[in-house]
Image: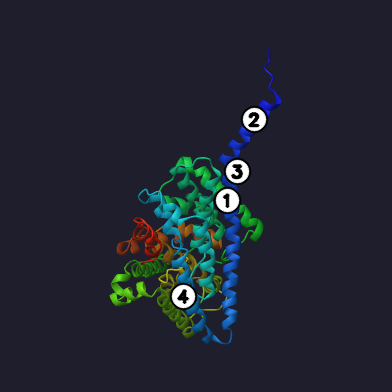
Amino acid sequence: MQARYRPAALWRLARRELRKSWLNYGVLWLGAVLVGLAAVQFANWTNAALAVFLGWIAGRAWLALLITPTLTALAVWLTRRWFGGSEGSGIPQVIAALHGPHDPTRIPRLFGLRILLGKIGVGLLGMLGGLTLGREGPTVHIGASIMYSMRRLYPRVSRRMERMLLLAGSAAGLSGAFNTPLAGILFAIEELTRSFEVRTNGVLITSIVFSGLVSLALAGNYLYFGQITAPDIFPIAFVLPVVIAAVLCGLAGAAFNLTLLRQARWIPRSVLAWRERSPLLWGAGLGLLVAALGIATGGQTWGSGYDQARHLLMNHGEQVSWYYPLVKWLSMVLSYITGLPGGLFSPSLSIGAGFGQWVSQWFGQYPQSALVAICMVGYLAAVTQSPLTSFVIVMEMINGGGLVIPLMATALISSRVANVFTPPLYEALAVQKYYALPSEPVAEAAAMRH
């Protein structure tokens, strides 16, 4: 006799299956959609913030001497007072959560709603002040915080599940920020985990897909920097500019890493002590230096440098000053050591583009767009020492399939050159700041120390 299910039993079975599907798929999909929305909206807000700043100082650049120090000091105070853990790009926080010593109090102090608000609000304040900060690293931190917050929808959360959510949110954030899904996958593998777990790859790719779909729906299928024009075939002599560009960018990236990681060696002890006693004055002083640098360079150092990189890459005829990569490098150092939320990706690409203009002037027989793209990859690879992510992310930004071999070679050489002098920046910052977070109540203040 065939068994018959009563309506109540069928309803319980359906509810159980729906709940299982929700926990296995729905929560993850919802989180990925929210990450995509946040990535697109944060990009719009950052562009608007810089536009407002440039509008304020249009025709009266001296106003930057008031605006930038004031907003920088305010942002430093907010970060130290309320949003400790949101400083910097956010990628070191993700690395510390994934690889640092197990501490159940670590992750809640580096991710969640408080960090999300600080990353967006204070980060926008810094960009409103014209600091040389990018939005892509912070978008990684935002994505990780959103996915980490989704754990509240699960009845039980293991450490492995927390790590999985953080990894998926970080990769989805990078993918949404640049519209580069392949780079998001490689970023998670190469930079965040240094491995590829079979049990995690489905979650990772699904998050990137849903975040990417939201980005496509809202922003369209765009190339971050646009389509470059470069030949697919280069002569064997093209090896020489590739090697020179790779070594140049490798050395410049290593110098940047050493400047951030060894501040105690080049900043006098008295200044370091003053920074701890008077963080607001420290922030205002750095803001004043950034403002003065921007005025002295005719505004070339304001913001992330996206426009300058795009003009050089597209070869629109609008060249930057020969000293642009040097002053942009200095502006990024000054902006980053304020301790505000802000990333390195876009400024690094812009600095690399400036070095690409140098190499293009040395080897004028080759297309400027190709040499600029090569140096963008080289400098980013030197700073992050993640060559695969660096060349794929730029290749996806410019649809540069014809430059795969030169881009890959440059990334590998630059990262090796930088590695001779310095460890990977994000990993070293994670160890310095977050592997051994002190116990409360001094954790938030100490997290800001460099």
Q: Quadrant of the N terminus?
A: top right
Asked if the residues shown at circle 1 and circle 2 are in contact, with their CB atoms under 8 angstroms apart, the answer is: no
C-alpha gap between disc 1 and disc 2: 29 Å
- Residue of label 4: 73
Q: Nearer the viewer, mark 4 or mark 1?
A: 4
For this rendering, which residue is in front, 432 or 310? Answer: 432
- Residue of label 2: 12
Which callout, 1 or 2, points at the residue further toward the start of the chain?
A: 2
- On the image, the x and y values in percent for residue 116 come to 52, 59
Q: How dense is the environment of label 3, judged by Cα within 10 Å: few (below 14), some, or many (20 and up)?
A: some
- Residue of label 1: 32
As shown in the figure, which amino acid type bears the numbered disc 2? Answer: Arg
Which callout, 2 or 4, points at the residue further toward the start of the chain?
A: 2
C-alpha gap between disc 3 and disc 1: 10 Å
Residue 404 placement, left or right of 221:
left
As shown in the figure, which amino acid type bears the numbered disc 4? Answer: Ala
- Residue of label 3: 26
- On the image, the x and y values in percent for residue 386 come to 41, 57
| Residue 364 seen in this snapshot | no
C-alpha gap between disc 3 and disc 2: 19 Å
